[in-house]
Amino acid sequence: MCGITGIFNTNGTPVFINTLRNMTDAISHRGPDGEGFWTNSFIGFGHRRLAIIDLSPMGHQPMQTEDGSYIITYNGEVYNFQNIISTHLI
């Protein structure tokens, strides 16, 4: 099971990557296959990855849209990913 960390500073102070790193290091046993971080001012996400099906770099998190408008980090599985991929490649 992946591990997720996050910070939302309601007082507007910036999130420091080292704080997120310390948090995700504390749960490194939840995801030995990779780590990732994203910060934007007073919000930050950290992720420890446990790769089960998708072992490629495409599964690294946090993920963001091409234009950077949306960021996500989650612990889950898209079970119909093969159908989704084949539908969009046609």
Image (spheres, rainbow, N blue to C red):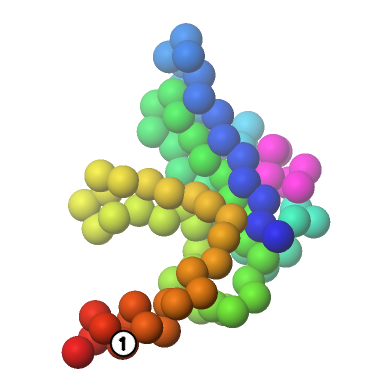
- Kindly state the secondary structure of the residue where label 1 is placed: helix
User: What amino acid does circle 1 point to?
Assistant: Ser
For the stretch drawn in magenta, the main secondary structure is: helix
Count residues near mark 1 (Cα–Cα under 10 Å), then give few for <14, some for 14-19, many for 20+: few
User: Is 28 inside the magenta-drawn segment?
Assistant: no
Residue 31 in view here: no
Q: Is residue 14 above or below residue 56?
A: above
> Mark 1 sits on what residue?
86
Q: Give the residue at x 50% y 64%.
A: 60
Residue 52 visible in the snapshot: yes
Horizontal arrangement in the rendering, residue 83 relative to residue 60 (left or right): left
Magenta span covers which residues? 21-27
| Magenta stretch contains residue 23 | yes
Query: In which image quadrant can residue 75 be found?
Result: bottom right
As displayed, is residue 82 above or below residue 51? below
User: Which quadrant is home to the N terminus?
Assistant: bottom right
Query: Hey, which quadrant is residue 88 in on the image?
Result: bottom left
Q: In the image, 56: left or right of 40? A: right
State the image coordinates of residue 79 (x, y, percent, origin top left).
51, 74
Looking at the picture, does residue 22 appear above or below residue 81?
above
Whole-percent x, y for residue 70 in the image: 31, 46
